[in-house]
Amino acid sequence: MHLGGAERPDAATLAAQQAKAWAMQRAHVMEHSGFYRALWDGQAPPERLEDGHALPLSDKAKLRLSQAAHPTFGDYLAAPLTQAIRLHRTSGTTG
């Protein structure tokens, strides 16, 4: 589909791509992130991305505690350091 000169997938194609990406992401995080397994109390992420609202969210305080307990990056890092090519962080904002 073309809109304003840009090529975009139709809704069904986009939904299929999103479902496939979510399936891969949820499996990877559950297998490789102790932080999220603990946060989710062993509950698997929902099969449908649209149902993700049922999972508890992480916050800055929880991420900081994870980093303190598991230096340098915390146990939320879901990849071995040898595979980390680039890491972006922000100082955050106060407002």
Image: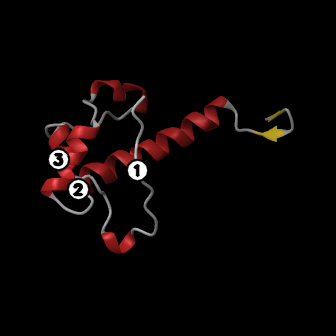
Q: Amino acid at mark 2?
A: Gly
Q: Residues within 10 Å of mark 1 (few under 14, many from 20)?
A: few
Q: SS of the residue at dot 1?
A: helix
Residue 79 at what x, y percent from top left?
32, 63
SS of the residue at dot 3?
A: helix
Instruction: Identify the residue position indicated by label 1 in the image.
Output: 24
Q: Residue at x 18, y 50 (%)?
A: 66
User: Above or below — where is 71 with respect to 16?
Assistant: below
Please say whether residue 34 is visible from this viewpoint: no
Binning the other alpha carbons within 10 Å of mark 2 as few (below 14), some (14 to 19) or many (20 upward) gives: some
Q: Amino acid at mark 1?
A: Met
Spatial CA span between label 2 and label 3: 8 Å
Which sits earlier in the primary sequence, circle 1 or circle 3?
A: 1
Of residue 17 and residue 94, the one placed in the foreground of this image is: 94
Outermost residue on the bottom side: it is 82
Please identify, in this view, whether the residue under mark 1 or under mark 3 is nearer the observer: 3
Between residue 80 and residue 60, name the one nearer to us.
Answer: 60
Q: Is residue 95 in sight in this rendering?
A: yes
Q: Left or right: 66 with respect to 11?
A: left
The label shown at residue 65 is 3
